[in-house]
Amino acid sequence: MGINRIDIVSIPVTNQQEAKQFYCDILGFELVRDNPMGPEQRWVEVSPPNAETSITLVTWFEKMPPGCVQGIVPDTDNIEESHSKLESRGLDISKIETAPWGKYTTFNDPDGNGWVLQQANPDA
């Protein structure tokens, strides 16, 4: 028996409702659940469509201030199309760069958590 996948990654945010709107409306993630979790806390979980791993938008980890997570790397089959779609939704996204392993672009969520959208080169 061993670890076989990452199920949920916690992303620290200032405002769960605003973060949920960003991840769903701008990035196109799907809402997995939005449930009360205790006094004045909510479990807000979102995921890219058909993905195994989801993220939860958290406000309760004292050692995880909003914006401290960097280098989250989702993958896309068509970076040019994804870049264009995200830009048209108002996302401030970097230009597409090329590396030996593929292409990538970077952006931040409203709290400054950093993302690197990649299209891996299948020959790398």
Image (cartoon, helix red, strand yellow):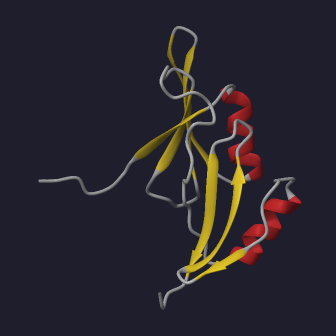
User: What residue occupies the far bottom of the structure in this picture?
Assistant: 123
Count of marks, rendered view: 0
| Residue 78 seen in render | no
Residue drawn at 56 percent across, 61 percent down: 74
| Residue 38 seen in render | yes
**Residue 116 picture quarter:** bottom right
User: What residue occupies the far top of the structure in this picture?
Assistant: 39
Residue drawn at 63 percent across, 36 percent down: 67
User: What residue occupies the far front of the structure in this picture?
Assistant: 99
Residue drawn at 47 percent across, 24 percent down: 63
Front position in the image: 120 or 86 = 120
Residue 40, how many percent across, how many down? 58, 11
**Residue 44 picture quarter:** top right
For residue 89, side relative to residue 29 (left or right) = right
For residue 50, side relative to residue 108 (left or right) = left
Q: Is residue 102 above or below residue 71?
A: below
Residue 37, how many percent across, how many down? 49, 19
Residue 85, how many percent across, how many down? 80, 65
For residue 28, side relative to residue 63 (left or right) = right
Q: Is residue 11 above or below residue 50?
A: above
For residue 114, side relative to residue 89 (left or right) = left
Q: Is residue 37 above or below residue 19?
A: above
Residue drawn at 82 percent across, 69 percent down: 84
